[in-house]
Amino acid sequence: MVRLSRKYIGTFFFLISICICLLISSKLVYADNLGVPDQITEHYGVFDEEGILDDAEQKADLESKLSKIYEKYKVNAYIIITTQIGMSDDYEGYLERKWTALPDRNSVILLIGFKSDDHVYVIRSYGEENSEKKLSTKRLQKIQDDMEADMRNYNFYKACCIFAKDVDKYLGSYDSVFDDVIFLKWWFQLLVLFVIFMIIFMLSAINTGERDDVTASTYLNGGKSKVVNGFDRYVRTTVSRVKINTDSGSRGGGGGFSGGGGHSSGGRGF
């Protein structure tokens, strides 16, 4: 009877130990070989496991910039810098696997792969609001253009600062669908202002020129001139009727936005 009790006690403690281990392991956050956690709880972050940035102050400054993006626009912002991914690797697949399962998919990610002589940097945006309306493919490519000079000189910190600045600019601007509207171009607005200014100037010049003092009284004799005759003639009134189409079936459905897939700038070497 005593042996049986000890056996059950040992089994009981063994099961308790397993439960404790499982509980502890469930609280741990594992990271992949790039140092990026499998379960990201922060809304922003700079992942530089290999220390490519010059010092900790640069990383802290970048994280501060990314945190402001989230605070202002509720868009998650991340930067990954690694020597384990290059242009020949499936960097798009990595980002897709990493972030499509996030509960909050309204995110933007910069991935810099500094693998040997196989370099690449790519920007991805997810979520309906910022992907479709703000951070379109064309705008992500413009951010790449702004970063290119520093990327080629390996100035990763400056390039990442440009990334954060441009993301903040585009998220705070009008929707990307208006990028090609000529009326919103700064040079077109400047041209319109110049034309208006020239018209006002010409009208002012004409009005301030010499005036002809000849008036109707020059040719009239006040004592003898008079109106001989006058009349008004009514011709006709024309009324046009236009039928108003009340068929609601001809109206468009508005199109809408397809959320989910997001946009990519495409990988670019440096």
Image (cartoon, rainbow, N blue to C red):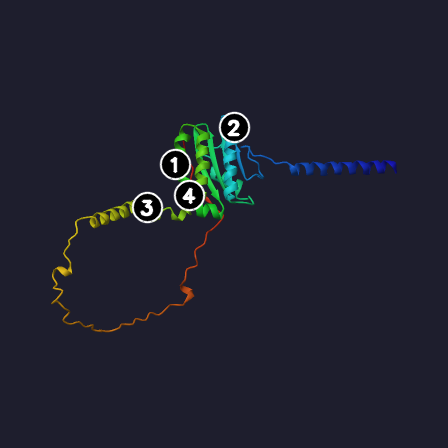
Picture residue at 50% right of the left edge, 42% below the top: 72
- The mark lying in front, picked from 2 and 1, is 2
* Distance Cα–Cα, label 4 vs label 2: 31 Å
How crowded is the residue under tag 4: few (<14 C-alpha within 10 Å), some, or many (20+)? many
Q: First in sequence, mark 4 or 3: give its number.
A: 4
Q: Position of residue 84 (x, y in %)?
A: 50, 31
Q: Is residue 137 visible?
A: yes
Considering only order in the chain, which callout, 4 or 1, is on the residue closer to the N terminus? Answer: 4
Residue 87 in view in this figure = no
Is 241 placed above or below 102 here? below
- Disc 4: which residue: 137
Instruction: Tell me the residue that label 1 is attached to.
Output: 145
The disc, 2 or 3, on the residue closer to the chain's N-terminal end is 2
Number of residues whose C-alpha sits closer than 10 Å to that of mark 3, classed few (under 14), some (14–19) or many (20 or more): few
Query: Which numbered disc, 2 or 3, marks the residue closer to the eye?
Result: 3
Nearer-the-camera pick, 62 or 8: 62
Q: Amino acid at mark 4?
A: Thr
Residue where numbered disc 2 is placed: 57
Given this view, does label 3 or label 1 mark the residue nearer the observer? Answer: 3
Query: Is 101 situated left or right of 268 in this image?
Result: right
Q: x, y percentage for residue 140? A: 42, 40
Quadrant of the drawing holding the C terminus = top left
Q: Mark 2 or mark 1: name the one nearer the start of the chain.
A: 2
CA gap, disc 2 and disc 1 = 26 Å
* Labelled disc at residue 189: 3
Q: Secondary structure at mark 2?
A: helix
Residue nearer the viewer, 253 or 100:
253
Residue ID at (76%, 36%): 14
Residue at position x 41%, y 62% in the image: 251
